[in-house]
Image: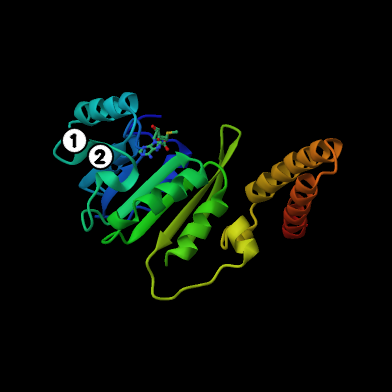
Amino acid sequence: MNSSQLSKRLETVAKYVPAGAIVADIGSDHAYLPCYLVKSGKITKAVAGEIVEGPFQSAVSQVQEDGLTDHIEVRKGSGLSVITPNEVTAVTIAGMGGPLIADILETGKQSLPGVQRLILQPNISGISIRLWLQENGWTITKEEILEEDQKIYEVIVADLTIEKKPLNAQDLLFGPYLRVEKSAVFKKKWLQELAQMRKIKKQIETSGQSEKNLERLRELEEKMRLIEEEIK
Ligand code: SAM
C-alpha cells in the first residue's frame, strides 16, 4: 500500500468521501488516505490528524514527498481537537476499534459543526459506533463489509439527514444495511464471532457459578441467539 495504491479497506473509505469535501482524517498514520484523495483529484484540501509522534512524522514526510503541503496540513493532537468547528465537511476515522472511534467522536463533538459526513471504519465492535451515531442525531446512509488479508472490516457512512431511522437491537449489532444485504463476508464474520463466543461460554461455564458468571452467560447467550437468528 502507498498513497497512490490504497488497500481495499482504505479504498472503500475513500469511495465514500464526497467529491470536493474538505476532509479531516483522524488517526492518519502515514497519511495515505488524504494524499490519495488529493492526488486522485477528488478533493483539494485536507487535515491529517495524528496523536503519536512516529506516525505524525510519517504523515509529514509522506505529504512532503507527494508535494502536497499546500493541500494537506498535518496536525499533531488527539482526535477531533485538531480541527475547529466549520473547518471541514467530512471526517474519516479508520483502522481503530469501534469503542475508540466512538470515544473520539464523543470527546470531540464540539468540533463537528460543519461536518456533513462521517466515514468510519472500525476493526471491531461496529455496534459502539452505531450507538453513538444514533444517540447523536446521525443517520447511517451506507455500510460495506469486506475481507482483506484474512481480516474482515466494516465501513460505516453517516450523514446529517432530516429523516431519522431508529435502529433496533439487531440493526445496532449487525448494521442496518449489512443485515439486509447478508453477503457471504457478513455470514463469515458472524460465524467466526459465534465460534469465539462458544469458546468463551465454555470457559465461563468451567469457571464456576458466581452471580457475575451467570450474568455474563445470560448476556452471551442472548447475543448468540441474535446471531444464530440473523444468519440462519
Ligand atoms: N487510519 C490509518 C489506516 O486506517 O490505515 C491508520 C490506522 S492506525 C492502526 C491507527 C492510528 O490512529 C495510529 O497511527 C494511532 O497513533 C492513531 N490514533 C490512535 N488514537 C488516536 C487519537 N485519539 N487521535 C489521533 N490519532 C489516534
Indicate left or right for 22 with 102 as reference: left
Residue plotted at (47% across, 39% down): 96
Q: Is residue 67 above or below residue 81?
A: above
**Residue 59's spot in the image, x, y percent?**
28, 30
Q: As shown in the figure, which amino acid type bears the numbered disc 1?
A: Leu
Q: State the image coordinates of residue 30 (x, y, percent, origin top left).
A: 33, 30
Please name the residue shown 34% across and 43% down the image: 79
Q: Residue at x 52, y 58 (%)?
A: 130
Instruction: Please indicate whether residue 79 sits to the left or right of residue 129 in the image.
Output: left
Rendering coords of residue 218 (x, y %)? 78, 53
View quadrant of ligand 1: top left
Decide which of tag 2 and tag 1 comes sooner along the chain. 2
Q: Nearer the viewer, mark 2 or mark 1?
A: 1
Mark 2–mark 1 contact, CB under 8 Å?
A: yes
The quarter of the image holding the C terminus is bottom right
Callout 1: few (<14), some (14-19), or many (20+) C-alpha neighbours within 10 Å? Answer: some
Q: Is residue 15 visible?
A: no
Q: Does the closest atom of ligand 1 sit within 8 Å of the Cβ of label 2?
A: no
Circle 1 residue? 68
What's under tag 2, amino acid-wise?
Lys
Q: State the residue position of label 2.
A: 39
Q: Is residue 107 above or below residue 55?
A: below
